[in-house]
Image: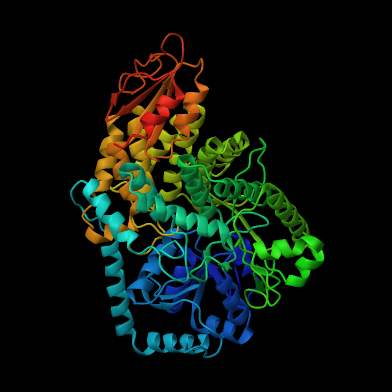
Amino acid sequence: MLPAANLLSRETSPYLLQHADNPVHWRPWGHAALEEARELDKPILLSIGYAACHWCHVMAHESFENPEIAGLMNRLFVNIKIDREERPDIDHIYMSALHALGQQGGWPLTMFIAPDGAPFWGGTYFPPEPRWGRASFPQVLNAVHAAWREKRDTVAKNGKALTEHLAELSATTPGPPLGPQQFQQFAGALLAQVDLTHGGIGDAPKFPNAPIFRFFWQEHCRTGRADLDDAVRHMLTSMCEGGIYDHLGGGFARYSVDAEWHVPHFEKMLYDNAQILDLLALTHAAEASRLYAERAQDTVGWLLREMRGPADNEGDSAFAAAQDADQEGEEGLFYTWQAAEIRAALGDEADAFCVAYDVRDGGNWEGRNVLRRVAPYGDETAERALATSRAKLFDIREKREKPARDDKILVDWNGLMIRALARASVVFDQPAWLEAAQSAFRFIDRTAREDNSRLAHAWRGRVSAIGQLDDYAAFTLAALALFEATGERLYLEKAEGAALEAQHLFGDADGSLFITAAGAADVPVARPRHARDNATPSGLGLMAEAFARLWHLTGDAHWRTSCEKLILAFSGAGAALALSPTLLAAADMLERAAVVVLAGEAGADGLLRVALASPDPATCVLRTKDGADWPESSPAHGRTPVGGKAAAYVCRGMVCGLPLTDAAALANDLGTRA
């Protein structure tokens, strides 16, 4: 039996450690806590959140730090606390159960489950006393306890129904191959949800929904549709000018509480900034934008300044997970301003700054000002003055107490950022960004591994969560991005090794993939498997893209077959496929991708830059010295320089065009719609 005490001080997760001093007898997720619930015949109160979550902090202060409420929790339940970023598989299971109950999801997630892990009821945030039409948390605790004691049959029935539903959600939906007709259909369905006034999807609260807009962009590259281009640029421009972007320090917040991208929920997540940086690079590559270039520059500046983790023995470092929304217990205090503060700091330059960034004497949000760019670009003199003003305010802000940082290293989120940096380094001509990406990759590859050498999911001084499909998929794509950017074959070997290991650990007989590895003994209900994208792209969709890229880069039929089987396992989902844009993009890439083979080294730089900076995500880059350094299956085999000069061969459908030695000709070829 576990001791009657809070056991979270033994953990490494910053979120769990935030709760280590609660009077609640928290347990980490695992067999010991489940066994304790069985022995005591108590239901489990499962609380899931993350370190940068504002409402998680609110519920903690109101309820988990309250001795009376904590005492009630301890008497009636076995209490388990989970960091959703460490265990996204467990979070997915119980969030899906909450949705099945007809409730809107969110964090903190509060679920009540039986000792065997079967969920039977839940919610999100509960106030300490009745408020806003919600029952109080103590009322909920007493009601659930009474149901457990007096209506066990009903509770068991609910748990059985939800568990069966979770098993159904984890099933595959086999169907026919996906092609242009389906891509167009689903792009249209998603495009119908776009806010034509402010950009993005839907109304408030408004999230970037980056996987959807990356699919839009790839469809634009396939078809030339201007409405898809407009949708992506409208959202990016609105975000770059809105308050969701930190105009002083760089980086984008997780979402906006309004439809206008004005007031953010102030936490900054690594995964959001990775995906937005990737979109900025893709769109800028097609049509240069001063706004996008500046936002990319400052966002990477924030990343390298604020988010680098500790260096390993070789001097390499990866990136932390998130920055908090709160400072001194108040959301957004670090980022917002009184007009008087700005006027005192800027003097004669204050009026111009206030006009440009919507600073009002009464504040533009709850008595304070969230900076947003509302004035168009001025001449060079005006913009230099605004830049000087921003720098002054940044220096003042740096003296404030900073929001906390969740400094755990997540392999999947780092993989997304490594890939984005590799692309952005070429598009924005920033070689140092590629060096940072390589450093992060080396750290992950060397340090974020379990004792059996498998990839981990989370690391903070030690591995704190085992690797999942998303980690292997993002790692594989990061390795491929670095292989294409550098030409170093070690990265390709790393990618192939990770993809093969993923098939071994997560694969099913039909070619589909589970989220958790075979033998994951602490997943008590259906082993999760889904192709749906959320704020991050699904691991299944990312792995499908990785298989497609490996096929195009190596010519190894194993990867084409793997990609086909994986897509076909979910292609029968009907209208629900619109929720899997990453999988759709992978299906397009499998059939349509262009492989640019660069043969030779003399004069290759211009050709290489054009190839690597292609705005179409369905472009792969492969290098060869003389065509003899790759096997016959490779599209690079037999491709040679021309007249002693480097030549580019654009290969589609494993058929290569005539050699091109002029960068402009290559750019023109890559701009041709397939």
Q: Can I make out residue 512 in this image?
A: yes
Residue furthest out toward the top: 643
Question: Residue 21: x and y, percent?
Answer: 66, 72
Q: Is residue 140 above or below residue 81?
A: below
Residue at (67% x, 46% y) in the render: 310
Q: Is residue 437 above or below residue 51?
A: above
Q: How many marks?
A: 0
Q: Can I make out residue 509 in this image?
A: no
Residue at (56% x, 67% y) in the render: 262
Q: Nearer the viewer, residue 617 or 74?
A: 617
Residue furthest out toward the left: 176
Residue at (35% x, 28% y) in the render: 554
Q: Nearer the viewer, residue 354 or 105?
A: 354
Q: Tell me: 194 left or right of 389.
A: left
Q: Nearer the viewer, residue 535 or 427?
A: 427
Q: Nearer the viewer, residue 17 or 99?
A: 99
Residue at (53% x, 82% y) in the render: 73
Question: Residue 453: x and y, percent?
Answer: 49, 40
Question: Residue 83: x and y, percent?
Answer: 53, 63
Q: Quadrant of residue 51?
A: bottom right
Question: Residue 161: x and y, percent?
Answer: 27, 74
